[in-house]
Image (tube, rainbow, N blue to C red):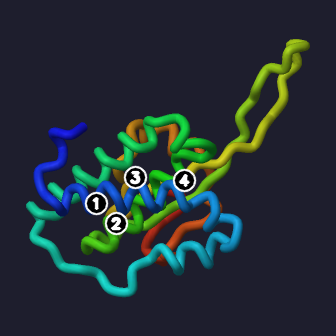
Amino acid sequence: MRKNFKTVEDIWIFIQILFIITTLPLVLRFYSLPGLMRVFTPRTLKINKSSDSEEFQDKVVRFTDYILSRKYLAGKNPCLKRSLVLYHLLRKSGMEVTICFGVRFNTMLLPAGSPQKRLEGHAWLLYKGKIFLEKNSEVVKSYKVTYIFPEEESISFANL
């Protein structure tokens, strides 16, 4: 991991991500989802060159995934933490990403062998109306969108 830190800015990005991930469980206790999204949405968008944005995006994704690969930091809801970190930092850098939250039923087998449906949630990003930075977009499509922020009239829920 040390080889990924080429500048002081890289270290600063890593520290920001680590701070957000470790404080998020506490923050989630005090804010509703709309309130949390207002806090996580930067007031202004910074304009970056596209090459800088791609390099920054790569660092943010790599550092976030590295931190969340540590089970003691990932805890519950790693997709929520990942999506919120990426949403906050990418919007701060000038990318107009959108965050989506969805649910689906997942059938589990009980020890007795009988099936039980369990509701599970997922969070992911959209960029220009398309699923963004997800390892398996087909899995994401199996979730029913329940909340999207910022709400945009141009996003069609049928296309997700």
Label 3 vs label 1: CA separation?
24 Å
* Crowd class of label 4 (few under 14; some 14 to 19; many from 20; radius 10 Å): many
Q: Do the numbered discs 2 and 1 sit on residues whose CB atoms are within 8 Å?
A: yes
- In primary-sequence order, the first of circles 4 and 3 is 4
In this view, the mark in front (2 or 1): 1
Q: Residue at x 48, y 77 (%)?
A: 153
Circle 1 is placed at which residue position?
13
Residue 43 at what x, y percent from top left? 39, 86
Residue 124 at what x, y percent from top left? 48, 53
Circle 3 is placed at which residue position?
131
Q: Do the numbered discs 4 and 2 sit on residues whose CB atoms are within 8 Å?
A: no
Residues 23 and 69: in front is 23
Q: Amino acid at mark 1?
A: Ile
Q: Quadrant of the N terminus?
A: top left
Q: Residue 160, can we see it?
A: no
Residue 73 at what x, y percent from top left? 52, 44
Label 2 vs label 1: CA separation?
9 Å
Above-or-below relation of 53 to 151: above
Q: Amino acid at mark 3?
A: Ile
